[in-house]
Image (tube, coloured by chain):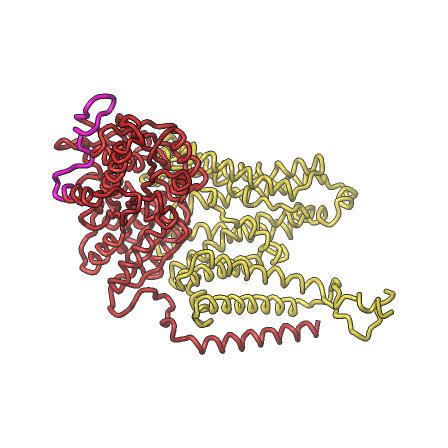
Amino acid sequence: MAKTNKSEPLFHIAKRSDMTFKKAILVRVIAVVAALVLCAIITMITTGLNPFTVYGSMAKGAFGTVRKSWITVQDTSILLLIALALTPAFKMRFWNIGGEGQVLIGALATSAVMLKLADHLPNPLLIAVMLVAAVLAGGIWGVIPAIFKAKWNTNETLFTLMMNYIATQLVAFFIIVWEYPKGAGKVGIINPKTELGWLPKIGNFMGSKYMLTIFIAVLTTIAMFAYLYYSKQGYEICVVGESENTARYVGINVGKVIIRTMFISGAICGLTGFILVAGIHQTITTSLVGGQGFTAVMVSWLAKFNPFIMIFASLLIIFLKKGAGEVATSCGLNESFSEILTGIIIFFIIGCEFFIRYKIIFNKKSAKGGNK
Amino acid sequence: MKKFSKFVALALACVLTFALCACSADTTESNGSGSSNGSSNQKSSVKAGLICLHDENSTYDLNFINGFKAACEAAGVEYLIKTGVPEGQEAYDAACELAEAGCNFIFADSFGHEDYIIKAAKEYPEIQFSHATGTQAHTENLANFHNAFANIFQGRYLAGIAAGMKLNEMIANGEITAEEAKMGYVGAFTYAEVISGYTSFYLGAKSVCPSVTMEVTFTGSWYDETAEKTGAQTLIDNGCVLISQHADSMGAPTACEQAGVPNISYNGSTEAACPNTFIVSSRIDWTPYFAYCIKAIEKGDAIATDWNGTLETGSVVLTDLGAAAVDGTAEAIEEARNKIINGELNVFDISTFTVGGETLTSYMADVDTDPAYEGDHEAIVDGYFNESGEGLRSAPFFNLQIDGISLLDAAY
């Protein structure tokens, strides 16, 4: 008996279903606060700055100037767009972690059109062709793993992940094909003199160049919400996600739903790639998406696939990212430091989901653990 | 859950207490904004920002960081440094962030940053942007975008003299015959910057040892320790009796030390690691340029579109000579140095080299960047190749293959 008592673990983990919405929010807030505190301690130890200075510069990083605030909103829009793109696939329990590659291939298609057709088409038509090319490229990149899943039930997680690497390598290849000047190993800014294919500003005020991206993100959010919650196709996605057999039983063509949904998913990613190239950066590099295809997975999950909550989730992540970057620069630290801070914060945010879904039950010393 | 939340609360409380204690202890360390790194005895109207491709671990970036800090601290200028900024849209973002942080002088250190810095310069016309090794300032016509470089070919020419004297000593000692005086050179890429560098090094050596020849190999990377080491070893196996390089790792100097072959390094002294084979090293000191820019902005003067550091401005410097250097080297270098400064000697004097067996009389150099590398400016003036000359551009454009130098490979 004494022996079994010794081998009894200190605690065990059980799934919980009793967490109220309020409590769940509280856990998340605690997680963010704890992350910030830990970041402050690490910054203090390495720099000797006081933590309030650190928080101050975090806020400054995201909203320090009018322009910074605009950029924060713009970056939030981009992250939100990718998260929105992934969501229908996730609702279908199709684990699309290929957002990175789908955005990148959209960006690649956009820059190909921008570079090769700029001299042959009038500007509005050029932009239209760029958009169509990007959406199709992203859609196709999403449909390829979907077809394999629908026909041969391949593992979509691995498949979409691998497609990211293919997209990155394709971009790397074309950068060398299009490099300028020759031997430089980079494309640089596309059409810098003529600005052909650059998305126009909306209006002419401070921040007008960021408006288009924000506008598209808002529209997509509303459209995605309506699609998921109020359309027949949205309902089909839900049914397939819950149980493929049920879906088949009620006469839903599961393969068709998978392929169609992944086309939508990839197409929105392609659209995001189009905005990144034509609207924001006017260049193509392998780091253009910068891992946001993966961060967006987190945004979508944190928001429980609700498009409106995703706005806040992406804002939070972008805010923390900008803040961490500012801390590193203003404290004279290496850029790697901001990555450490972002890592800590994201670790806490993801980690807290564990406490929302599960509970830890400490085994009382007096309890007899012999037979369960 | 209750127990757990208690635990969390306790942990948070501890953490906060610790945070508050620690903060009260060291608030004096920084000023309120936490953004000042420069000394603040004097108030300057300049706040400077530096964008680096890598961080202090790369000798190339370290050279900029050191020069930048030295100039800012001397002038009492506040500064910010962004390290690890890739040659992509990140460079534009970094430039904008520095601008938003209040910098009015922003400098980027890598060739591939240029497009993105130009994009930022167009957006912030009131801020001065400068870029090292770039080629577009003179065609871009922006009042606030500038290129800068230094005539490092002068430094390499002087280092070449030290190499030539070493070869002469080997010939005099009977270690090699005059015909066996072959040097090796490990280059990164077949860019004009590298070609200009190894040619000037070769001409320096040839000025004291007329029978010298040279073999060049390329690694295809600015920093690849293994490739540079292998490259140097290949050259040594080919019979090269002295090695120099234009790449940023310790690969070539290490290979030389192991093989006992004399070495001329770059970017700073490698004597500590290579005590037996180190002769001398040349490098660009960026401090004078940064100091010049800071002063110009403080006074409200314009910064030159293309600024070229020289021996005279203190931008091109040689390290102290190593133990492997021959006696009299210092004097010979000093003499040539003075001749270069007073214009008596031109590194690329057309009477000292031939191309395809013929003396050059005219050459259209590719000064304005274009995809096909078409020549657009006459580079031969007054009997010499006007490398990085006045009215052209600061970045090197000498890309001729002169006789006496053979390339082992030119894939990069």
Check the rendered structure and report the hue given to chain A.
yellow
**Percent position of residue A265, x then y:** 59, 44
> Residue A289 in magenta?
no
Indicate left or right for A212 with B156 as reference.
Answer: right
Q: Position of residue B412 (x, y in %)?
A: 39, 32
Taking depth in this image into account, of B217 and A163 the one nearest to the observer is B217
Report the quarter where the N terminus of chain A lies.
bottom right
Task: Label the red chain with its letter.
Answer: B
Q: What stretch is highlighted in magenta?
A: B339-361
Q: Is residue B395 visible?
A: yes
Asked if residue B179 lies left or right of residue A346, the reply is left
**Taking B9 as reference, is B159 above or below it?**
above
Instruction: Indicate whether B317 appears above or below A322.
Output: above
Q: Which residue is drawn at 55% across and 42% down?
A: A102
Residue A59 lies, with reference to residue A114, above or below; the image says below
Asked whether B57 or A118 is in front, the reply is B57
